Image (cartoon, rainbow, N blue to C red):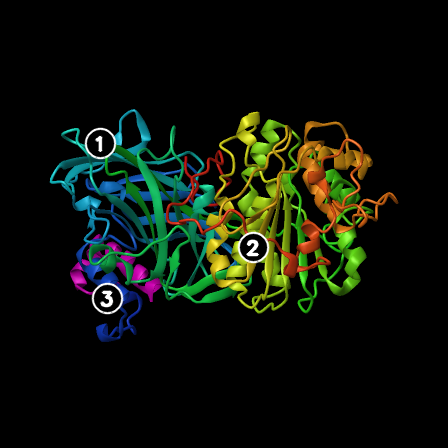
Amino acid sequence: MKGFLKLKFVLLLIAFFSAITLILNVPAYTQAQNTVSIDPSTLSAKEQEYNEQSSLQPMTAIQALDSSTQELDNGIPEGTIGRWSVIVQTGGESRSAQITAHRQTSNDTFTENVLYDYFTYIDTGINGGGIQLSSANASLPVRDPGNPNVVTSSGFFVGQNGNTIDWTVSSSIAEGKQTMTNRYAFTSRDGGQIGKLRLLQYLDEDVESFSDDVFLTKGASATSNLELLTLDDREVYGIGQSGLFRGEPNGLTNAVFAGWAADIYNNMKPRITGAGQSISLEGIIANLPDYIHPTLGAVRGPRDIVSVLAWDINEGTSEAVVVTSLGGLPDPTSVFRPPNVAPPGKKIPVGDIDPNKPTVIITHGLSDNNYDEVSADGNFDEILFSGFSSGGGGYLIKQQFGNKVNVIQYVWPEAFQGLSIEGYQEARLYTDDAGAALAKYLVEKLGKSYNKNIHFIGHSLGTIVNAHAARLYLDVAPSVPQAQVTILDYPARSERFGIGGPAIPHDFFATLLQQIQNKTNLKIDNYYSTNFSAFGETAEGRIYNHPNLVDPNEVGDEIFPQENDGGVFAKNHTGVQQWYRWTMNPEGFNGNNYCDNRNPAGFNTPQGMSNTLDPCQAAWYWSLFGQGGWGKFPTANIGAPIDINQGVQLDLGAPRAFGCEYE
């Protein structure tokens, strides 16, 4: 129906300029399709709105360019995949965004308006009664004479305190990018406090037909790279929205991200302008059923989808800045990279995954090796702690359980950046994407109805990958009876060594996983060292934090001497995961007796080694699959749940976004 109405409107435009049609006084669409008739009573609310708009002004299927609008585009030639253009109204709003995409099912190149409403609302009570920014004494949008890729508009409104608040929005699209960025600046005219103020960025997409689109998220607000994406179910292209979640120098100023929500048309706009729209940092999703998409994996829908992102201005400030973004998704690769898994003998050496068995996933961090070379040789086992060669994590677990447990050695190519500051920073940008790919793989191989235990073990940046994967997978697999996330020296102190701070916040795992903990039997344990060349620290929330491991590099010297190459990352940071592997089989490495029960301490400490490195009945011992099991699992020792509505802000540099990244 939507496509027909678009055709109808195009033909109406043609008819307007056609002398023949004017003379005959016959509607153009009647000439072209004279067997079509429409009963208005059979139309949905949105279809009726389309018709009303088409009879009044071209705002939806084709938004006309006039003095009230300005068009921005990314400079890619028309008809070329990746071209992105937006007709900008005042307030940075729009009802027309064209993406030239590759349609998956039709296998063609197609240009489509994927936007119905992209509106900005301001709420001076943060409890409903929001108004559109474009209605707040707004000027017409004008193109910046110094930069044709920027359009600005401005206006003012009355704040909570009766004060006048001036606003300006700058909209821009960078060359070659599928993203429009809006920068909103608010200033209290008298220099006083702005008072309560929330900005809500509302998106109603329509990709081809408006009732068959699917919704998914990428990233998270905790890692400053959240994206809300909507794509056509059949053709798999679409649109998304995001923004900036971090502070100075280029992000938020005197504002915090408040949360997001997704629903179906037309539930959200009446709430925003009425009693208020509920949001949270983890997102509130309503009326969008779970759905496994053949290309995208776990999504929501298909439905007529709307979403909103919200930011709160600090009440006591006189100036604030919020940045949002709207992006086109020209094909499925804009959303997911393929899962990083290979045939048996390489990245998943255990062969086929059996959904009737429990599962352990082991994920590595930064690597100094060349991925293509290692992949060609097939020797991941030799270079990664997760491997299946003698002493590797996969080997030690298989040694205990044989084929009774799925053991997945998860390899993410983006981690193979080299042991350098730049390499660390680059790899960190891909952690959420690698986690999403892992979750997608688990959905494909284990399914959403999986009902066996699952244990995620990650080292360094692999802890971030696993956290994203655990959140995404456990959210759609509620029948998992017990789950565990093990953290090995997560990058909590990287900024102290100048390798890309700010570091991962102490409440990162709790913020990301607390809602999963609330509905799933999920335990989290954290092992770290505060020595030089290690980066871990305690983690907040319902998490067991093991005592600090002092000089864990000694484990490498004693148990894994062949693995230490003298580099800075092969010392205490590596020592944490080496110690954890040691706990899997404390007596099985070199014939020495380390766990003599006659020793009151229970640990025959090698010379020069700290008692904190005792591997006897620790770590793996009390894991889901350890000898002691969860009955021996220590009590969480940081304590109460955190307030996830406060969230965390993490500077990840420029996260590798997919379709709605910001500039």
| Distance between the alpha carbons at the discs numbered 2 and 3 | 43 Å
Q: Helix, strand, or loop for circle 2? A: helix
Q: Tell me the kind of residue under disc 2.
A: Ala
* Residue 375 falls within the magenta-colored stretch: no
The magenta segment is 1-28
Q: Helix, strand, or loop for circle 3? A: helix
Is the C terminus in the top left, top right, bottom left or bottom right quadrant? top left
Magenta-colored segment: predominant secondary structure: helix
Q: Residue at x 80, y 50 (%)?
A: 597
Q: Name the residue under label 2.
A: 470
Q: Mark 1 points at which residue?
A: 318
**Of callouts 2 and 3, which one flags the residue occurring earlier in the amino acid sequence?**
3
CA neighbours of label 3 inside 10 A, class few (<14), some (14 to 19), many (20+): some
Q: Mark 3 points at which residue?
A: 48
How many numbered markers are drawn? Answer: 3
CA neighbours of label 2 inside 10 A, class few (<14), some (14 to 19), many (20+): many
Asked whether, in this view, residue 486 is left or right of residue 53, the answer is: right
Examine the rendering and report whether any part of residue 100 can be seen: yes
Q: Tell me the kind of residue under disc 3.
A: Gln
Q: Nearer the viewer, residue 26 or 397?
A: 397
Q: Tell me the kind of residue under disc 1.
A: Ser
Q: Nearer the viewer, residue 198 or 325?
A: 198
Examine the rendering and report whether any part of residue 69 can be seen: no
Is the N terminus in the top left, top right, bottom left or bottom right quadrant? bottom left
